[in-house]
C-alpha cells in the first residue's frame, strides 16, 4: 500500500491543529514528525511536548523521525508522547542494533534513516529487524530542498536488497518530493511518501487529492 506522510515541519504552526485535521480528513496516512536537535542537524524543531499536545486530537499514525545524536536516550519519552513509528539515523547511533531493539521493546515500529551519502551496506545486519527504511533524498535539516536525483538508484537498490533478504519493509522517501516527481519515486520502489511544502503550501485538500490521483494512476 502506498502511504502519504505529510511533514508537520511545513505546517503553519498558528493553525497546526486545524491543518492536522485537514490532512487526516483528506486521506493522509501518517503525520511525519521531524525532530531536530541542532547538533546532528543544524536546525532545531520541536520535541515531546508538541507531539503529546497534538496526539489526543488525531488518529493519524505518528511517524517520528529523530534527527538527533544518540536517540536511544529519548526513545521512551517519544513513545510516551505518542509515537507509533520511530525512525533513527544510522549515522547518529553508536549501537544501531541496540537502538532498534529498544524501539521494538517499547511497542513501536522501527525505522532507520540514511543520509544521501550513506551507503546501503550499513543495513546489512539489521535489515530483517526493521519495519521501514527512510531514504533521505535531501540532506536533512531544512525543508524546501530539491530532490537529489541519485536517490532513485538508491531506492531501487534498497528494494532489490530487501527482496533478496526476504525483508518485509516499507521504503519511505523524504525530501523534495512533489506531484511532478512522485511517480519516479514510486517506480523506483518506494511506498511511503513524505511531502512537506508540496502538501501544506496552497490548498491542502487539493494537494493531497493530487498525490492520491498519482498513487491511483501508479496502481492502475
Image (cartoon, rainbow, N blue to C red):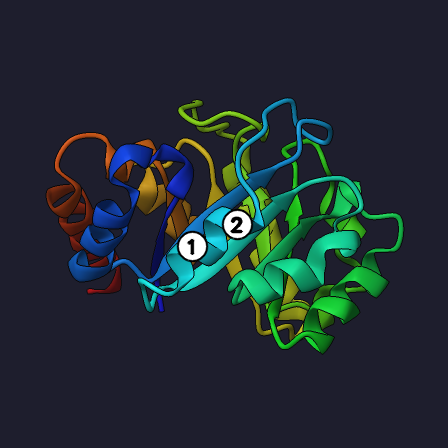
Q: Nearer the viewer, residue 181 or 12?
A: 12
Which quadrant, please, contains the C terminus? bottom left
Residue 139 image point, x, y percent: 59, 27
Q: Nearer the viewer, residue 220 or 34?
A: 34
Identity of the residue drawn at 70% across and 40% down? 68
Q: Is residue 171 left or right of residue 164?
A: left
Separation of marks 1 and 2 at Cα, in angstroms: 6 Å
User: Does 196 appear above or below 73?
Assistant: above
Q: Nearer the viewer, residue 65 or 151?
A: 65
Question: Circle 1 — which element?
Answer: helix
Identity of the residue drawn at 66% across and 67% down? 130
Identity of the residue drawn at 70% across and 59% down? 75
Q: Is residue 168 left or right of residue 56?
A: right
Q: Which residue is mark 2?
A: 49
Mark 1 in CB contact with mark 2 (< 8 angstroms): yes
Q: Is residue 123 left or right of residue 166?
A: right
Residue 17 image point, x, y percent: 27, 49
Q: Which residue is mark 1?
A: 53
Q: Based on the displayed image, in which of its 4 quarters is residue 215 positioned?
A: bottom left
User: Does 67 appear above or below 186?
Assistant: above
Residue 45 image point, x, y percent: 53, 33
Q: Based on the displayed image, in which of its 4 quarters is residue 146 positioned?
A: top left
> Can residue 132 be seen here?
no
> Can residue 108 be seen here?
yes
- Which numbered tag is attached to residue 216? none
Q: Residue furthest right?
A: 94
Residue 111 image point, x, y percent: 62, 59
User: Does 126 appear above or below 192?
Assistant: below
Q: Is residue 47 left or right of residue 146?
A: right
Amino acid at each position: 500500500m502506498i502511504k502519504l506522510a505529510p511533514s508537520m515541519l511545513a505546517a503553519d504552526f498558528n493553525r497546526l491543529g486545524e491543518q492536522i485535521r485537514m490532512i487526516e480528513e483528506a486521506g493522509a496516512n501518517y503525520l511525519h514528525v521531524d525532530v531536530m536537535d541542532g547538533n546532528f542537524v543544524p536546525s532545531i524543531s520541536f520535541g515531546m511536548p508538541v507531539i503529546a499536545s497534538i496526539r489526543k486530537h488525531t488518529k493519524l499514525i505518528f511517524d517520528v523521525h529523530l534527527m538527533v545524536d544518540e536517540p536511544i536516550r529519548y526513545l521512551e519519552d517519544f513513545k510516551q508522547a505518542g509515537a507509533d513509528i520511530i525512525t533513527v539515523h544510522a549515522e547518529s547511533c553508536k549501537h544501531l542494533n541496540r537502538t532498534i531493539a529498544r524501539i521494538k521493546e517499547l511497542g513501536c515500529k522501527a525505522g532507520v534513516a540514511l543520509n544521501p551519502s550513506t551507503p546501503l551496506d550499513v543495513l546489512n545486519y539489521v535489515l530483517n529487524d526493521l519495519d521501514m527504511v527512510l531514504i533521505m533524498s535531501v540532506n536533512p535539516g531544512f525543508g524546501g530542498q530539491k530532490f537529489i536525483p541519485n536517490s532513485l538508484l538508491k531506492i531501487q537498490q534498497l528494494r532489490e536488497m530487501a527482496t533478496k533478504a526476504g525483508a518485509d519493509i516499507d521504503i519511505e522517501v523524504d525530501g523534495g518530493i512533489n506531484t511532478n516527481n512522485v511517480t519516479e519515486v514510486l517506480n523506483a520502489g518506494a511506498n511511503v511518501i513524505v511531502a512537506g511544502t508540496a502538501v501544506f503550501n496552497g490548498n491542502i485538500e487539493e494537494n493531497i487529492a493530487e498525490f492520491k490521483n498519482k498513487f491511483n494512476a501508479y496502481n492502475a
